[in-house]
Amino acid sequence: MSSERPAGTTRALVRLGRFAAGDALPALRRGVAWVRGTADELAIRMLGRDFEERLRRVPLQVAHDGIDPFGLHLDTAKYACAVAAFLHRIYFRTEVSGIERVPPGAVLLVANHSGQLPLDAVVIGASLFLDAEPPRLVRSMVEKWAQGLPFVSTFFQRVGQVVGVPDNARLLLAQGEALLVFPEGARGIAKPFRERYQMTEFGLGFMRLAMETHTPIVPIAVVGGEEQYVNVGNIEPLARLLGMPVFPVVPQWFLPGGQLPLPTKYRLYFGEPLRFEGDPDDEDAAIAEKVALVKAAIDRMLRRGLATRRGVFW
């Protein structure tokens, strides 16, 4: 059998190649440019015309390619900020109180955790960038198990979030960063609905870090996240099988459009900075006493916020 192509086939391939070189590729490039331009315009509308100016005021150690030592990619972060701004300003209609209490320089932001997905972290980050003066870029400590999820670890890295290990935290605080910590971890985010606004046990690591680095702690109470997804239970065997800390049962996820969070109204309350002295290597019982003070400050703000809100959605 001959391996030569018929003359008609050869001519067709030549025409196809010419089309790709002369028409298709430029058209594809124009399409990509249009999509990028549209995305940029939408980002500007969500973030405001002063976004670039606010970004320039945030101290970042980025290389010429726009990437910092922890993998933060400025272009990716810009589009992520636009989504965060939409959630913060339009979808959740967040009310913010006391943000002026966040001191300049290195700070640990410690908040209650809830909502099945870490949208509370997104809203806090958006608030510190869009509402605070000067604007702050918040770094969140991400659970180590999340780094094994496909695409998730890369995305978290590109938007400036880091794996929650002490060495990363020390480096960020040494750079004067604002570090967001949820001491409840996965226990808090996956609470069943019947336990809403009942904080679970706090870890001790953030307090040891604050004492070691002489970093102030700003307690934050988040009201509104508990109702965005109604969790009725946890399938522990499936969680173990998938290597996840929990596998929540959220009925609304099985409804059309139920994958979106309910548009609850978020309220953020920033407390007065707390400073702690002492030996960071002290016994757990001594550290736990200090942690209890932070937890109590958050709980007081939660109770006040719940008592004064008119409803879940307004």
Image (cartoon, rainbow, N blue to C red):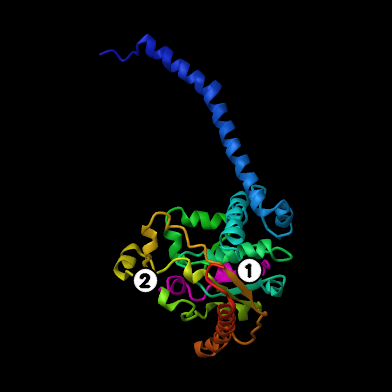
Q: Position of residue 294 (x, y in %)?
A: 58, 83
Q: Quadrant of the N terminus?
A: top left
Q: Is residue 190 magenta?
A: yes
Q: Residues within 10 Å of mark 2 (few under 14, many from 20)?
A: some
Query: Image quadrant of residue 53?
Result: bottom right
Q: Callout 1, which amino acid?
A: Glu
Q: Position of residue 75 (x, y in %)?
A: 62, 49
Q: Callout 2, which amino acid?
A: Val
**Which residue does the numbered mark 1 point to in the structure image?**
95
Q: Quadrant of the C terminus?
A: bottom right
Up the image or down, 151 lies above or below 5; here it is: below
Secondary structure beneath dot 2 equals loop
Q: Which label belongs to residue 232?
A: 2
Gap in angstroms between the C-alphas marked 2 and 1: 28 Å
Q: Is residue 115 magenta?
A: no
Q: Residues within 10 Å of mark 1 (few under 14, many from 20)?
A: some
Q: Which residues are magenta?
A: 165-192
What is the count of numbered marks? Answer: 2
Query: Image quadrant of residue 134?
Result: bottom right
Q: Position of residue 251 (x, y in %)?
A: 36, 64
Secondary structure beneath dot 1 equals strand
- First in sequence: mark 2 vs mark 1: 1
